[in-house]
Image (spheres, coloured by chain):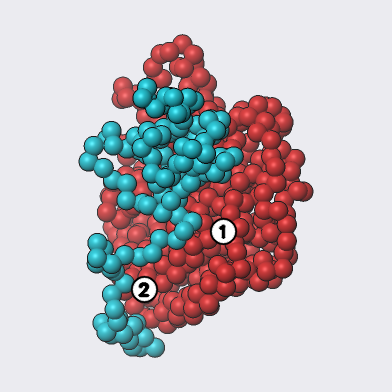
Amino acid sequence: MKLGIIKEVFKNVFTKPMTLLFPFERLEIPERNRGEHSFDIDTCISCGACARICPNLALEMIEAPPEMKEKYPKTYPQIDIGKCCFCGLCEDTCPKGSIKLTTNVFLATFDKDDTVRSPMSWNK
Amino acid sequence: MVEKTFRSRFRTEVDGSDAPPGADHHIFIGPQHPWAEEPAHFIIHLKGERVVEADIRIGFNFRGMEKAMEARTWRQNTMLVPRACGICSAVHQNVYVRVVDRLAGVEDQISERARLIRMFSLEAERIHSHMLWYGILAHDAGFDTMLHISWRDREIIMDIVEDFSGNRVNPSLMLPGGVKRDISKEKADKAKPLLGELTKKVEYHKKVFVEEASIRNRLEDVGVLSKDDAKKTSPNGPTGRASGLPFDIRKSYPYELYDELDWKLVYYTEGDVLATTLVRIDETLESLQMCKQILDKLETSKGEILARVRPRIPAGEYMTRGEAPRGEDIHYGIANGTDKPERYKIRAPSLGNIDATLKRMDGEYIADMPVILRSYDPCFSCTNRVMIVNDTTGEKMIIGQDEFAQKAIKAKKYNRPFF
Protein backbone atom coordinates (compact mmCIF):
# COMPACT_ATOMS: atom_id res chain seq x y z
CA MET A 1 0.00 0.00 0.00
CA LYS A 2 2.89 2.31 -0.77
CA LEU A 3 0.90 4.01 -3.50
CA GLY A 4 -2.47 3.77 -1.75
CA ILE A 5 -3.33 7.35 -1.11
CA ILE A 6 -1.60 8.54 -4.29
CA LYS A 7 -3.93 6.30 -6.28
CA GLU A 8 -6.90 8.06 -4.70
CA VAL A 9 -5.45 11.42 -5.70
CA PHE A 10 -5.05 10.40 -9.34
CA LYS A 11 -8.53 8.89 -9.38
CA ASN A 12 -9.94 12.21 -8.27
CA VAL A 13 -8.20 14.13 -11.01
CA PHE A 14 -10.42 12.45 -13.61
CA THR A 15 -13.74 12.49 -11.74
CA LYS A 16 -16.40 15.16 -11.71
CA PRO A 17 -16.04 17.78 -8.98
CA MET A 18 -18.26 17.43 -5.90
CA THR A 19 -19.20 21.11 -6.00
CA LEU A 20 -21.95 22.57 -8.15
CA LEU A 21 -22.09 25.90 -9.98
CA PHE A 22 -24.76 27.15 -7.67
CA PRO A 23 -27.19 29.51 -9.37
CA PHE A 24 -27.27 27.39 -12.52
CA GLU A 25 -27.42 23.94 -10.96
CA ARG A 26 -28.51 23.10 -7.45
CA LEU A 27 -28.96 20.16 -5.13
CA GLU A 28 -32.45 18.98 -4.48
CA ILE A 29 -33.60 19.96 -1.00
CA PRO A 30 -35.41 17.12 0.82
CA GLU A 31 -39.13 17.65 1.43
CA ARG A 32 -38.70 17.41 5.18
CA ASN A 33 -36.42 20.44 5.21
CA ARG A 34 -37.35 23.05 7.76
CA GLY A 35 -37.22 26.31 5.83
CA GLU A 36 -39.45 29.31 5.38
CA HIS A 37 -42.99 28.98 6.76
CA SER A 38 -46.14 28.93 4.70
CA PHE A 39 -49.34 30.11 6.34
CA ASP A 40 -52.94 29.68 5.25
CA ILE A 41 -54.95 32.43 6.90
CA ASP A 42 -58.32 30.96 5.84
CA THR A 43 -57.85 27.77 7.86
CA CYS A 44 -56.35 29.54 10.89
CA ILE A 45 -58.64 29.47 13.94
CA SER A 46 -56.61 32.05 15.92
CA CYS A 47 -55.95 29.69 18.81
CA GLY A 48 -52.48 31.16 19.41
CA ALA A 49 -50.87 27.79 20.13
CA CYS A 50 -48.02 28.56 17.74
CA ALA A 51 -47.21 31.85 19.46
CA ARG A 52 -47.27 30.19 22.87
CA ILE A 53 -44.95 27.34 21.94
CA CYS A 54 -42.38 29.34 19.97
CA PRO A 55 -39.11 29.11 21.97
CA ASN A 56 -37.72 32.35 20.53
CA LEU A 57 -40.93 34.39 20.62
CA ALA A 58 -40.66 34.82 16.88
CA LEU A 59 -44.42 34.46 16.43
CA GLU A 60 -46.80 37.14 17.61
CA MET A 61 -50.58 37.26 17.34
CA ILE A 62 -51.63 40.53 15.69
CA GLU A 63 -54.86 41.96 14.35
CA ALA A 64 -55.59 42.33 10.67
CA PRO A 65 -55.28 45.83 9.12
CA PRO A 66 -58.52 47.93 9.19
CA GLU A 67 -59.42 47.37 5.54
CA MET A 68 -59.37 43.60 6.02
CA LYS A 69 -60.82 43.60 9.50
CA GLU A 70 -64.25 42.61 8.30
CA LYS A 71 -63.05 39.45 6.65
CA TYR A 72 -60.51 38.55 9.32
CA PRO A 73 -61.82 39.77 12.69
CA LYS A 74 -59.52 37.75 14.97
CA THR A 75 -55.77 37.79 15.63
CA TYR A 76 -53.33 36.03 13.38
CA PRO A 77 -49.66 35.09 13.74
CA GLN A 78 -46.99 37.40 12.46
CA ILE A 79 -43.51 35.90 12.16
CA ASP A 80 -40.06 37.38 12.43
CA ILE A 81 -37.87 35.06 10.37
CA GLY A 82 -34.80 36.69 11.91
CA LYS A 83 -35.72 35.30 15.32
CA CYS A 84 -36.89 31.89 14.12
CA CYS A 85 -34.71 28.86 14.89
CA PHE A 86 -36.64 26.59 12.48
CA CYS A 87 -37.39 23.97 15.09
CA GLY A 88 -40.81 23.24 13.60
CA LEU A 89 -42.72 23.25 16.90
CA CYS A 90 -45.33 25.64 15.44
CA GLU A 91 -45.94 23.22 12.60
CA ASP A 92 -46.35 20.32 15.05
CA THR A 93 -48.66 22.16 17.40
CA CYS A 94 -50.99 23.76 14.85
CA PRO A 95 -54.34 21.92 15.17
CA LYS A 96 -55.51 22.84 11.67
CA GLY A 97 -52.23 22.52 9.79
CA SER A 98 -52.24 26.17 8.78
CA ILE A 99 -48.52 26.65 9.36
CA LYS A 100 -46.12 24.50 7.41
CA LEU A 101 -42.38 24.68 6.95
CA THR A 102 -41.37 24.66 3.30
CA THR A 103 -38.13 23.91 1.50
CA ASN A 104 -37.33 27.54 0.77
CA VAL A 105 -34.04 28.26 2.51
CA PHE A 106 -33.04 31.44 0.67
CA LEU A 107 -34.11 33.94 3.28
CA ALA A 108 -31.34 36.52 3.29
CA THR A 109 -32.53 40.11 3.02
CA PHE A 110 -30.87 43.48 2.58
CA ASP A 111 -33.19 45.18 5.04
CA LYS A 112 -33.75 43.90 8.56
CA ASP A 113 -37.43 44.85 8.47
CA ASP A 114 -38.00 42.49 5.55
CA THR A 115 -37.64 39.51 7.86
CA VAL A 116 -41.01 40.26 9.48
CA ARG A 117 -43.94 38.65 7.66
CA SER A 118 -47.42 39.87 8.48
CA PRO A 119 -50.19 37.22 8.37
CA MET A 120 -51.64 38.76 5.21
CA SER A 121 -48.43 38.64 3.25
CA TRP A 122 -47.21 35.16 4.16
CA ASN A 123 -46.87 32.92 1.20
CA LYS A 124 -49.49 30.23 0.99
CA MET B 1 4.86 13.99 44.82
CA VAL B 2 1.21 13.18 44.49
CA GLU B 3 0.28 16.83 44.93
CA LYS B 4 2.68 17.90 42.23
CA THR B 5 1.50 15.35 39.71
CA PHE B 6 -2.20 15.90 40.15
CA ARG B 7 -2.53 19.57 41.00
CA SER B 8 -5.59 21.15 39.49
CA ARG B 9 -4.77 22.18 35.98
CA PHE B 10 -7.80 24.34 35.48
CA ARG B 11 -6.14 27.12 37.43
CA THR B 12 -2.95 28.94 36.58
CA GLU B 13 -1.52 32.36 37.26
CA VAL B 14 -1.22 34.83 34.39
CA ASP B 15 2.34 35.87 35.27
CA GLY B 16 3.55 32.29 35.26
CA SER B 17 4.48 32.35 38.96
CA ASP B 18 3.01 28.89 39.52
CA ALA B 19 4.84 27.35 36.59
CA PRO B 20 6.42 23.98 37.31
CA PRO B 21 10.12 24.05 38.24
CA GLY B 22 12.49 23.36 35.40
CA ALA B 23 10.37 24.98 32.73
CA ASP B 24 12.19 27.67 30.78
CA HIS B 25 9.61 28.64 28.15
CA HIS B 26 5.86 29.09 28.29
CA ILE B 27 3.79 28.89 25.15
CA PHE B 28 0.27 30.24 25.14
CA ILE B 29 -2.20 28.73 22.68
CA GLY B 30 -5.57 30.35 22.26
CA PRO B 31 -8.26 31.46 22.90
CA GLN B 32 -7.88 32.72 19.33
CA HIS B 33 -5.50 30.48 17.46
CA PRO B 34 -5.36 29.07 13.92
CA TRP B 35 -5.17 25.55 15.31
CA ALA B 36 -8.36 25.73 17.27
CA GLU B 37 -11.85 26.19 15.93
CA GLU B 38 -13.12 26.81 19.42
CA PRO B 39 -11.92 29.03 22.22
CA ALA B 40 -9.73 27.41 24.86
CA HIS B 41 -6.54 28.74 26.38
CA PHE B 42 -3.70 26.26 26.75
CA ILE B 43 -0.52 27.17 28.60
CA ILE B 44 2.32 24.82 27.76
CA HIS B 45 5.41 24.92 29.97
CA LEU B 46 8.49 23.76 28.09
CA LYS B 47 12.02 22.76 28.83
CA GLY B 48 13.83 23.01 25.56
CA GLU B 49 11.59 21.25 23.11
CA ARG B 50 9.88 18.96 25.61
CA VAL B 51 6.71 19.72 27.50
CA VAL B 52 7.08 19.78 31.27
CA GLU B 53 3.44 20.37 32.01
CA ALA B 54 0.39 21.90 30.42
CA ASP B 55 -2.47 23.95 31.83
CA ILE B 56 -5.82 24.92 30.47
CA ARG B 57 -8.32 27.69 30.97
CA ILE B 58 -11.81 27.39 29.65
CA GLY B 59 -14.88 29.52 29.95
CA PHE B 60 -14.54 31.82 26.94
CA ASN B 61 -17.69 30.57 25.35
CA PHE B 62 -20.10 30.54 28.23
CA ARG B 63 -23.63 31.15 26.99
CA GLY B 64 -25.79 30.86 30.07
CA MET B 65 -27.83 28.10 28.54
CA GLU B 66 -28.90 26.43 31.77
CA LYS B 67 -30.26 29.74 33.01
CA ALA B 68 -32.09 30.23 29.72
CA MET B 69 -33.69 26.83 30.11
CA GLU B 70 -35.31 27.88 33.37
CA ALA B 71 -37.23 30.57 31.49
CA ARG B 72 -38.68 28.19 28.90
CA THR B 73 -41.11 25.34 29.08
CA TRP B 74 -40.04 21.70 28.98
CA ARG B 75 -41.35 21.36 25.43
CA GLN B 76 -39.51 24.46 24.20
CA ASN B 77 -36.30 23.30 25.84
CA THR B 78 -36.38 20.22 23.61
CA MET B 79 -35.29 22.57 20.84
CA LEU B 80 -32.81 24.52 22.96
CA VAL B 81 -30.88 21.56 24.36
CA PRO B 82 -29.53 20.29 21.00
CA ARG B 83 -27.95 23.71 20.53
CA ALA B 84 -25.61 22.91 23.41
CA CYS B 85 -23.24 21.32 20.95
CA GLY B 86 -22.69 21.88 17.27
CA ILE B 87 -21.98 18.27 16.38
CA CYS B 88 -23.51 16.06 19.06
CA SER B 89 -26.94 17.67 19.08
CA ALA B 90 -29.00 14.47 18.97
CA VAL B 91 -27.38 12.93 22.04
CA HIS B 92 -28.06 16.02 24.15
CA GLN B 93 -31.64 15.94 22.97
CA ASN B 94 -31.90 12.21 23.65
CA VAL B 95 -30.64 12.49 27.21
CA TYR B 96 -32.95 15.45 27.79
CA VAL B 97 -36.05 13.68 26.53
CA ARG B 98 -35.21 10.66 28.64
CA VAL B 99 -35.09 12.91 31.71
CA VAL B 100 -38.47 14.38 30.79
CA ASP B 101 -39.95 10.97 29.98
CA ARG B 102 -39.02 9.69 33.43
CA LEU B 103 -40.21 12.81 35.23
CA ALA B 104 -43.51 12.81 33.35
CA GLY B 105 -43.94 9.08 33.92
CA VAL B 106 -44.39 8.10 30.29
CA GLU B 107 -41.25 6.02 30.03
CA ASP B 108 -43.13 2.75 29.52
CA GLN B 109 -45.49 4.22 26.91
CA ILE B 110 -42.79 4.91 24.37
CA SER B 111 -43.11 2.45 21.54
CA GLU B 112 -40.36 0.28 20.17
CA ARG B 113 -40.54 2.11 16.88
CA ALA B 114 -39.93 5.49 18.50
CA ARG B 115 -36.96 4.11 20.39
CA LEU B 116 -35.49 2.63 17.20
CA ILE B 117 -35.78 5.96 15.40
CA ARG B 118 -34.11 7.70 18.32
CA MET B 119 -31.29 5.17 18.17
CA PHE B 120 -30.86 5.66 14.44
CA SER B 121 -30.45 9.36 14.98
CA LEU B 122 -27.86 8.76 17.70
CA GLU B 123 -25.82 6.29 15.68
CA ALA B 124 -25.93 8.40 12.51
CA GLU B 125 -24.63 11.26 14.58
CA ARG B 126 -21.81 9.14 15.96
CA ILE B 127 -20.80 8.21 12.42
CA HIS B 128 -20.63 11.75 11.13
CA SER B 129 -18.99 13.10 14.27
CA HIS B 130 -16.20 10.51 14.17
CA MET B 131 -15.66 10.99 10.44
CA LEU B 132 -15.40 14.72 10.95
CA TRP B 133 -12.97 14.20 13.78
CA TYR B 134 -10.48 11.96 12.04
CA GLY B 135 -10.54 14.26 9.05
CA ILE B 136 -9.49 17.16 11.25
CA LEU B 137 -6.90 15.02 12.99
CA ALA B 138 -5.34 14.21 9.62
CA HIS B 139 -5.42 17.92 8.81
CA ASP B 140 -3.61 18.73 12.06
CA ALA B 141 -1.05 16.06 11.29
CA GLY B 142 -0.40 17.68 7.93
CA PHE B 143 -2.24 15.08 5.85
CA ASP B 144 -4.84 17.19 4.11
CA THR B 145 -5.66 14.55 1.49
CA MET B 146 -7.30 12.45 4.19
CA LEU B 147 -9.26 15.47 5.40
CA HIS B 148 -10.79 15.92 1.98
CA ILE B 149 -11.42 12.22 1.45
CA SER B 150 -13.13 11.68 4.80
CA TRP B 151 -15.22 14.83 4.59
CA ARG B 152 -16.27 13.96 1.06
CA ASP B 153 -17.46 10.54 2.18
CA ARG B 154 -19.13 12.04 5.26
CA GLU B 155 -21.62 13.71 2.92
CA ILE B 156 -23.25 10.30 2.41
CA ILE B 157 -24.39 10.01 6.02
CA MET B 158 -25.24 13.71 6.14
CA ASP B 159 -27.55 13.23 3.17
CA ILE B 160 -29.26 10.31 4.92
CA VAL B 161 -29.78 12.35 8.08
CA GLU B 162 -31.08 15.27 6.04
CA ASP B 163 -33.47 13.01 4.18
CA PHE B 164 -34.87 11.53 7.42
CA SER B 165 -35.06 14.64 9.52
CA GLY B 166 -34.82 17.74 7.33
CA ASN B 167 -31.57 19.07 8.68
CA ARG B 168 -27.96 18.01 8.38
CA VAL B 169 -26.47 18.44 11.83
CA ASN B 170 -29.49 19.31 13.92
CA PRO B 171 -32.00 16.57 13.22
CA SER B 172 -34.23 17.41 16.24
CA LEU B 173 -36.12 14.18 15.72
CA MET B 174 -36.95 13.57 19.36
CA LEU B 175 -39.68 14.91 21.58
CA PRO B 176 -40.69 13.93 25.09
CA GLY B 177 -42.85 10.87 24.58
CA GLY B 178 -41.34 9.66 21.34
CA VAL B 179 -40.14 11.11 18.07
CA LYS B 180 -41.41 13.78 15.72
CA ARG B 181 -41.06 12.10 12.38
CA ASP B 182 -41.36 8.55 11.18
CA ILE B 183 -38.87 6.81 8.92
CA SER B 184 -40.94 5.38 6.10
CA LYS B 185 -40.04 2.18 4.26
CA GLU B 186 -39.13 4.06 1.07
CA LYS B 187 -36.69 6.26 2.92
CA ALA B 188 -35.14 3.27 4.69
CA ASP B 189 -34.77 1.38 1.42
CA LYS B 190 -33.08 4.40 -0.11
CA ALA B 191 -30.63 4.65 2.80
CA LYS B 192 -29.58 0.99 3.05
CA PRO B 193 -27.35 0.81 -0.06
CA LEU B 194 -25.80 4.15 0.89
CA LEU B 195 -24.84 2.75 4.29
CA GLY B 196 -23.20 -0.22 2.58
CA GLU B 197 -21.28 2.12 0.32
CA LEU B 198 -20.15 4.18 3.30
CA THR B 199 -18.96 1.06 5.12
CA LYS B 200 -16.60 0.29 2.25
CA LYS B 201 -15.27 3.83 2.33
CA VAL B 202 -14.69 3.83 6.09
CA GLU B 203 -12.86 0.53 5.76
CA TYR B 204 -10.64 2.24 3.23
CA HIS B 205 -10.07 5.14 5.68
CA LYS B 206 -8.97 2.64 8.31
CA LYS B 207 -6.60 1.08 5.82
CA VAL B 208 -5.06 4.49 5.16
CA PHE B 209 -4.56 5.24 8.85
CA VAL B 210 -3.07 1.81 9.56
CA GLU B 211 -0.91 1.32 6.50
CA GLU B 212 0.08 4.76 5.24
CA ALA B 213 3.52 5.43 6.75
CA SER B 214 3.34 9.23 6.70
CA ILE B 215 0.28 9.42 8.96
CA ARG B 216 1.03 6.36 11.06
CA ASN B 217 4.49 7.59 12.08
CA ARG B 218 2.96 10.90 13.04
CA LEU B 219 0.44 9.32 15.41
CA GLU B 220 2.02 6.14 16.72
CA ASP B 221 3.55 6.32 20.21
CA VAL B 222 2.64 9.97 20.46
CA GLY B 223 0.94 11.17 23.63
CA VAL B 224 0.70 7.81 25.32
CA LEU B 225 -1.81 7.67 28.17
CA SER B 226 -1.13 4.46 30.08
CA LYS B 227 -3.91 2.50 31.70
CA ASP B 228 -2.80 3.52 35.21
CA ASP B 229 -2.77 7.21 34.28
CA ALA B 230 -6.12 6.79 32.62
CA LYS B 231 -7.58 5.31 35.79
CA LYS B 232 -6.32 8.30 37.79
CA THR B 233 -7.47 11.00 35.38
CA SER B 234 -10.70 9.17 34.50
CA PRO B 235 -11.27 10.00 30.85
CA ASN B 236 -14.53 8.86 29.31
CA GLY B 237 -15.64 7.80 25.89
CA PRO B 238 -13.19 6.96 23.11
CA THR B 239 -10.31 8.61 25.01
CA GLY B 240 -10.72 6.11 27.82
CA ARG B 241 -11.41 3.19 25.53
CA ALA B 242 -8.13 3.83 23.68
CA SER B 243 -6.26 3.46 26.97
CA GLY B 244 -7.78 0.13 27.84
CA LEU B 245 -10.78 1.23 29.89
CA PRO B 246 -13.62 -0.71 28.23
CA PHE B 247 -16.41 1.52 29.46
CA ASP B 248 -19.34 2.52 27.28
CA ILE B 249 -22.68 3.65 28.70
CA ARG B 250 -24.46 1.86 25.86
CA LYS B 251 -22.98 -1.44 27.06
CA SER B 252 -22.61 -0.84 30.79
CA TYR B 253 -25.97 0.80 31.49
CA PRO B 254 -28.02 0.20 28.34
CA TYR B 255 -30.63 2.79 27.49
CA GLU B 256 -33.19 2.88 24.66
CA LEU B 257 -32.82 -0.55 23.00
CA TYR B 258 -29.06 -0.90 22.88
CA ASP B 259 -29.20 -4.22 24.71
CA GLU B 260 -31.31 -5.72 21.92
CA LEU B 261 -28.87 -4.92 19.15
CA ASP B 262 -25.94 -7.08 18.24
CA TRP B 263 -22.77 -5.04 18.58
CA LYS B 264 -19.42 -5.26 20.27
CA LEU B 265 -17.51 -2.83 22.40
CA VAL B 266 -14.38 -1.45 20.73
CA TYR B 267 -11.32 -0.79 22.82
CA TYR B 268 -7.58 -0.63 22.40
CA THR B 269 -4.87 -0.82 25.05
CA GLU B 270 -2.04 1.16 23.45
CA GLY B 271 -3.21 4.58 24.65
CA ASP B 272 -1.48 6.64 21.96
CA VAL B 273 -3.16 8.99 19.48
CA LEU B 274 -3.27 6.26 16.85
CA ALA B 275 -5.27 4.11 19.25
CA THR B 276 -7.81 6.89 19.83
CA THR B 277 -8.13 7.21 16.07
CA LEU B 278 -8.62 3.50 15.50
CA VAL B 279 -11.16 3.31 18.32
CA ARG B 280 -13.21 5.94 16.57
CA ILE B 281 -12.89 4.39 13.12
CA ASP B 282 -13.88 0.97 14.47
CA GLU B 283 -16.79 2.56 16.30
CA THR B 284 -17.87 4.17 13.06
CA LEU B 285 -17.94 0.75 11.40
CA GLU B 286 -19.79 -0.67 14.39
CA SER B 287 -22.33 2.16 14.26
CA LEU B 288 -22.83 1.61 10.54
CA GLN B 289 -23.80 -2.01 11.08
CA MET B 290 -26.02 -0.94 13.98
CA CYS B 291 -27.78 1.52 11.66
CA LYS B 292 -28.41 -1.31 9.21
CA GLN B 293 -29.83 -3.48 12.00
CA ILE B 294 -32.09 -0.64 13.13
CA LEU B 295 -33.43 -0.10 9.62
CA ASP B 296 -34.12 -3.85 9.34
CA LYS B 297 -35.93 -3.83 12.67
CA LEU B 298 -37.99 -0.81 11.66
CA GLU B 299 -39.68 -2.85 8.94
CA THR B 300 -41.43 -5.07 11.44
CA SER B 301 -41.82 -2.80 14.47
CA LYS B 302 -45.18 -1.19 15.04
CA GLY B 303 -46.57 1.42 17.37
CA GLU B 304 -47.42 5.06 17.81
CA ILE B 305 -44.36 7.21 17.45
CA LEU B 306 -45.47 9.91 19.88
CA ALA B 307 -47.10 9.36 23.28
CA ARG B 308 -48.99 12.19 24.90
CA VAL B 309 -47.05 14.13 27.52
CA ARG B 310 -48.80 16.78 29.57
CA PRO B 311 -47.10 20.17 29.59
CA ARG B 312 -46.99 20.26 33.40
CA ILE B 313 -44.33 17.89 34.68
CA PRO B 314 -44.89 16.61 38.24
CA ALA B 315 -42.32 17.59 40.84
CA GLY B 316 -39.28 15.39 41.04
CA GLU B 317 -35.68 15.08 40.01
CA TYR B 318 -33.79 12.69 37.79
CA MET B 319 -30.28 12.26 36.48
CA THR B 320 -29.39 10.22 33.46
CA ARG B 321 -26.57 9.85 31.01
CA GLY B 322 -25.84 8.77 27.50
CA GLU B 323 -22.87 7.92 25.35
CA ALA B 324 -22.06 10.92 23.18
CA PRO B 325 -19.52 10.59 20.37
CA ARG B 326 -16.99 12.28 22.67
CA GLY B 327 -17.80 10.49 25.90
CA GLU B 328 -20.28 10.52 28.68
CA ASP B 329 -23.05 13.11 28.63
CA ILE B 330 -24.81 13.67 31.96
CA HIS B 331 -28.05 15.59 32.43
CA TYR B 332 -29.77 16.37 35.69
CA GLY B 333 -33.17 18.00 35.88
CA ILE B 334 -35.39 19.17 38.71
CA ALA B 335 -39.11 19.67 38.05
CA ASN B 336 -41.30 21.67 40.40
CA GLY B 337 -44.77 20.82 39.15
CA THR B 338 -45.05 23.68 36.66
CA ASP B 339 -44.35 23.55 32.95
CA LYS B 340 -40.84 24.97 33.41
CA PRO B 341 -37.78 23.31 34.95
CA GLU B 342 -36.63 24.46 38.36
CA ARG B 343 -33.01 23.70 37.54
CA TYR B 344 -31.29 21.88 34.73
CA LYS B 345 -27.66 20.84 34.63
CA ILE B 346 -25.64 19.53 31.71
CA ARG B 347 -22.23 17.90 32.08
CA ALA B 348 -20.79 17.70 28.59
CA PRO B 349 -18.26 14.98 27.70
CA SER B 350 -15.24 17.11 26.76
CA LEU B 351 -14.93 18.37 30.32
CA GLY B 352 -14.18 14.89 31.61
CA ASN B 353 -11.43 14.36 29.06
CA ILE B 354 -9.41 17.53 29.58
CA ASP B 355 -7.41 16.26 32.55
CA ALA B 356 -6.41 13.09 30.76
CA THR B 357 -5.34 15.04 27.69
CA LEU B 358 -3.16 17.36 29.75
CA LYS B 359 -1.59 14.28 31.34
CA ARG B 360 -0.97 12.93 27.83
CA MET B 361 1.19 15.94 26.96
CA ASP B 362 3.79 15.45 29.69
CA GLY B 363 7.21 14.82 28.19
CA GLU B 364 6.10 15.13 24.58
CA TYR B 365 7.56 17.32 21.83
CA ILE B 366 5.99 20.71 21.24
CA ALA B 367 5.53 19.74 17.58
CA ASP B 368 3.16 16.96 18.63
CA MET B 369 0.85 19.33 20.49
CA PRO B 370 -1.73 19.82 17.72
CA VAL B 371 -2.50 16.13 17.36
CA ILE B 372 -2.52 15.52 21.12
CA LEU B 373 -4.80 18.46 21.77
CA ARG B 374 -7.05 17.19 19.00
CA SER B 375 -7.01 13.64 20.34
CA TYR B 376 -9.95 14.06 22.72
CA ASP B 377 -12.16 15.79 20.16
CA PRO B 378 -12.39 19.15 21.92
CA CYS B 379 -15.80 20.72 21.87
CA PHE B 380 -15.90 23.80 24.02
CA SER B 381 -19.23 25.12 22.98
CA CYS B 382 -20.75 22.35 25.06
CA THR B 383 -18.06 22.15 27.73
CA ASN B 384 -18.16 25.71 28.92
CA ARG B 385 -20.56 25.34 31.72
CA VAL B 386 -17.89 25.57 34.40
CA MET B 387 -17.56 29.15 35.40
CA ILE B 388 -14.19 30.69 36.04
CA VAL B 389 -15.01 34.35 35.67
CA ASN B 390 -12.49 37.17 35.61
CA ASP B 391 -13.92 40.41 36.87
CA THR B 392 -13.79 43.47 34.65
CA THR B 393 -12.04 45.49 37.33
CA GLY B 394 -8.88 43.47 36.91
CA GLU B 395 -9.48 41.61 40.14
CA LYS B 396 -9.50 37.87 39.62
CA MET B 397 -12.60 36.09 40.67
CA ILE B 398 -13.37 32.44 40.55
CA ILE B 399 -16.94 31.57 41.40
CA GLY B 400 -18.83 28.35 41.43
CA GLN B 401 -22.02 27.56 39.72
CA ASP B 402 -24.32 27.94 42.73
CA GLU B 403 -22.80 31.28 43.60
CA PHE B 404 -23.23 32.42 40.02
CA ALA B 405 -26.87 31.41 40.09
CA GLN B 406 -27.43 33.25 43.37
CA LYS B 407 -25.75 36.35 42.02
CA ALA B 408 -27.83 36.21 38.86
CA ILE B 409 -31.04 35.89 40.84
CA LYS B 410 -30.10 38.79 43.11
CA ALA B 411 -29.05 40.96 40.18
CA LYS B 412 -32.41 40.37 38.53
CA LYS B 413 -34.38 40.86 41.74
CA TYR B 414 -32.82 44.16 42.72
CA ASN B 415 -32.20 45.28 39.13
CA ARG B 416 -28.52 45.96 39.56
CA PRO B 417 -25.39 44.96 37.63
CA PHE B 418 -24.10 41.43 38.03
CA PHE B 419 -20.75 42.27 39.68
**Looking at the picture, how far across and down is residue B233, in whole percent?**
55, 52
Check the image and report above or below for A95 versus B327.
above
Q: Which residue is mark 1?
A: B121
Describe the element under mark 1 as helix, strand or loop: helix
Q: Colour of chain A?
A: cyan
Q: Is residue B250 visible?
A: yes
Residue in view at x 45 percent, y 70 percent: B156
**Looking at the picture, how far across and down is residue B90, in whole percent?**
54, 52
**Looking at the picture, how far across and down is residue B294, in whole percent?**
64, 67
Q: Residue A123, which numbered label?
A: none
Residue in view at x 39 percent, y 17 percent: B417
Horizontal side of residue B129 vs B245, given as left or right: left
Determine the residue located farthest toward the right in the rendered image.
Answer: B108
Q: Colour of chain B?
A: red
Type of amino acid under label 1: Ser
Of residues B218 and B175, which is closer to you in this image? Answer: B175
Describe the element under mark 2 as helix, strand or loop: helix
Task: Quote the CA–CA distance across marks 2 and 1.
Answer: 24 Å
- Could you tell me which chain the residue with mark 2 belongs to? B
Determine the residue located farthest toward the top in the rendered image.
Answer: B414
User: Which callout, 2 or 1, points at the residue further toward the start of the chain?
Assistant: 1
Type of amino acid under label 2: Ile
Check the image and report above or below for A99 versus B48.
above
Q: Which residue is mark 2?
A: B149
Determine the residue located farthest toward the front in the rendered image.
Answer: A70
